[in-house]
Amino acid sequence: MDRTGFAYFVESPRIIEDLLAPHPIEQETQYEIVNTVKLAKIDYENFITDMIADRQFIEEYAALCAEGDAWRCLLVQQRGRTDGVLVVPVDGCYVGWAAYYRG
């Protein structure tokens, strides 16, 4: 798995579809994955359909994440899948910025 790359980050997304909007490549931001969280199918579905809720698994790793030249983020995935959501937390347990990760 690549630990770095470029992705289109969206501020305060509500659902995964918010991350899939067409965008110019110049709007992509460099990222670095600092940790990966693998969720059961039901938990992942709950996450991608309600990204504004606070999440314990985000809070656990929030201190590792930050904006900067390369955004340090979590990769949240469903077990057994290669795609997922890159997350830069805000206020400890909330999704501040997120991007779709193609895998």
Image (cartoon, rainbow, N blue to C red):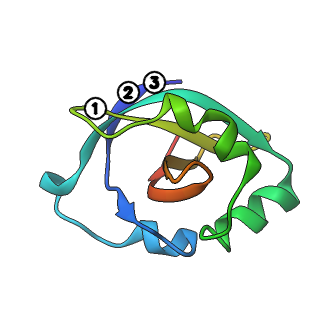
Given this view, does label 1 or label 2 mark the residue nearer the observer? 1
Asked if one can make out residue 12 in the rendered structure from this viewpoint, the answer is yes
Tell me whether circle 1 and circle 2 mark residues in contact (CB < 8 Å): yes
Quadrant of the rendered image containing residue 24: bottom left
> Is 46 left, or right, of 23 in this rendering?
right
| Amino acid at circle 3 | Arg
| Amino acid at circle 2 | Thr
- Disc on res. 2: none
From the image, tell me which residue sits under label 3. Answer: 3
> Is 67 left, or right, of 93 in this rendering?
left
User: Reading the chain from its start, which is encountered first: label 3 or label 1?
Assistant: 3
From the image, tell me which residue sits under label 2. Answer: 4
From the image, tell me which residue sits under label 1. Answer: 70
Q: Position of residue 80 (x, y in %)?
A: 78, 40
- 34 up-or-down from 94: above or below: above
Tell me whether circle 3 and circle 2 mark residues in contact (CB < 8 Å): yes
- 51 up-or-down from 100: above or below: below
| Amino acid at circle 1 | Ala
Q: Position of residue 40 (x, y in %)?
A: 86, 49
